[in-house]
Amino acid sequence: MEEQARLFNLQYAMYTIVFIAVSSLALGYLARIMARLRGFSQAEQRKVFWGFMFAGPWIVGFLIFVLGPALASLYYSFTNYQIGDKIEWAGLDNYRTLLLNEGRQGRNFNKAMLNSFYYAIIGVPLQIGAALGMAMLLNNEMRGIRIFRMIFYMPVILAGGPAILLAWRYMLASNGGFVNESLQKFADTFVVFDYIYRGFIYLMEAFNGFYIGITTGDPLGPISFTIAGAAGLLLIGLLALGEWTEGKRTMAWRSAQIIGIVIVYRLMAKGLMADPVDPAWIYFLGIVVLASTMSMAWQRQPRIKLVQGAGLVILLAAVVGVLSHTDYDATSVEARRYFIPAALVAVPMLGSWVGRWNTQKYRVLGGCLAVLSLILFVRLASGQLDGHHLNVVTHYLTFGSTLEHTDDLNYLDKVYPANQMSSLWFFGLTVAVMLGMALLNETYPRARRWLSYGALAFFALFTIGSYLDGRTYFQAFEKIAEAAGKPVYHFAMFRQATSEFPVAGRVPLWMNSELWSKPSLILITMWSSGTGMLIFLAALKNVPRSMYEAAEVDGANTLQRFFKITLPLISPAMFYNLVIGLIAALQTFENVYILQTPLTVDSLQSAAFLLYSRTFSELHIGEGAAMSWILVVIIVTLTILQFRFSRSWVHYEA
């Protein structure tokens, strides 16, 4: 039996070698034929043949082991494939369940994605700060510095091992753990540190309690307007205060684009998964096609015909796909809702296809673009910007309340959130103000100042008013629970964390509480920031000492030298660490797998870990594949945005 197994393995290995040789040779001949068809010389054809033949093993391996499984995964994401069951086509059902938070799995995916964003938004900046701090310490010339570099890098070698992660679990134990014992020793020795320590516990538990409330889907009420108003106040305040510069104009453009993209993605995640798709998305797609065509024509780009054709094909595919719900009945009222925007795009696009571009073509396309935009705005504004909903603005600007029945739990939990206008309108208002400031720029400085100061006053009053109403909203849940003699379930952990200031001797429950599980994982990630430290250290070594000396002669202090010289010159390293850190944070898996406990499995669960559990533990291949492709789209989009918006702050000329 053993001899047969050895012979089988040897035979299988021989077949593999033959397959690799034959496939590589075939790939080389195919590349040579393509080179001949393109008119290459005999010498160039030989180079192409040998090049592709020797690269054949990697190319064939990529097609079989990477591209093939990826395409299979994409197909499975549109099925309800489960191990042991027959594969059945499900269309967008998996994506609809996940993106619309339908059922238990939809809610779990939403919670896991919010946890992943927590690791990215909170953890990555802290990790980059730790790496930069260590690099600046190690950049000093002193005896034994190489030993310190080895010590600082050692966690990178050890961090991925299960034994080290388990050691962290013991060190972070609430009773007798090394971390808590050390912190408590300092707190007992220094009174000031004790108050800082307890304040840190209070703030961390309050923040994480509020975040847990968001992930579990507790209604925010007026606080959603507070968040939108505070974001607008912060962004516009950064632009309005101080001297207006070209850098602020660039910041306004970039910020407006980023927020606009986030709004569109948010709406797409909800709207495109509707069954059938809302006609507003056909209008939006038409606007994108017309605007792209006009922009390329204005810039005289040669591939405009390709863009026109691709836009028409995409639009036609979208309309046909949506009309499948109406059995292609062109006379139905439902079908007309999709044909009208398609016609407003297709007719002028086909007209612009023939002949040269002139003023009349621009006018026709611009007119259709304006009509589509107006109709889309009216559709979106319907039920959102009427008098009843706009009362939110007047109430909050005068510090009034929008709550009508503070003693009705059903009203607070379901009726009030459903009847309020979306807070996305105020994010959109922030985008409009920043675009206005960027367009006015230095051409109309007085108008720009009036716009910025007016927006600042509006968002300041709106934020304060909505916060006061939000506080009333949260207190209403507490009063109802107290009258019924039941605990408050609305943001329960946040209420518990903020009910009283931590007493002396209080320690963080790192691995035993939902309030501390995510900070624990981020702390371990910061401990292993050695790779980023090496990148920063290499960048710091390339900063010319002469620039620091010149700045010191000019009277620049340490902070000025850091922000004006160090950060700009190491910006490529900063950008690299940011991109890699963000991707790694969204793919967090090993730490969650090892560190989770029954008490923290929900609070630690990342999107990658849920993908693994759903696919390989519960054997729901179709749903797991859909999760993977959603995660791929998010990671690719964020990476593209980082590259797109890095040009204004990353300086490679150094």
Image (tube, rainbow, N blue to C red):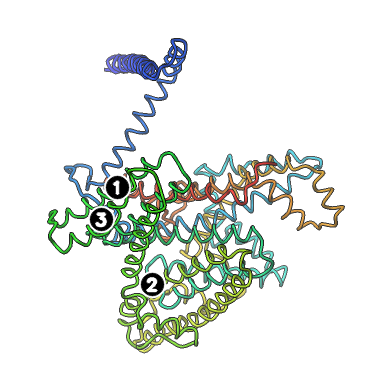
| Amino acid on which disc 2 is placed | Ser
Q: Residues within 10 Å of mark 1 (few under 14, many from 20)?
A: few
Which residue carries the number 2 mark? 422
Q: Are circles 3 and 1 on residues that touch, CB within 8 Å?
A: no
**The one of 555 and 504 positioned closer to us in this rendering:** 555
Q: Amino acid at mark 1?
A: Leu
| Residue in view at x 49 percent, y 67 percent | 432
User: Residue 97, can we see it?
Assistant: no
- Residue 9, x across and y down, in percent: 32, 18
Give percent across and percent down for residue 511: 49, 59
Q: Earlier in the sequence, mark 1 or mark 2?
A: 1
Which of labels 1 and 2 is toward the front? 1
Camera-side residue: 509 or 610? Answer: 610
Q: Is residue 411 above or below residue 248?
A: below
Quick one: SS at disc 2?
A: loop
Residue 343 - label: 3
Is residue 515 placed above or below 293 in the rendered structure?
Answer: below
Extreme residue in the top direction? 42
Place of residue 190 in the rendered image (x, y in percent of width and height, measured from the top left): 72, 69
Please name the residue shown 57% across and 58% down the image: 177
Q: Nearer the viewer, mark 2 or mark 3?
A: 3
Amino acid marked by disc 3:
Ala
Residue farthest toward the right in the current orientation of the protein: 553
Q: Which residue is mark 1?
A: 350
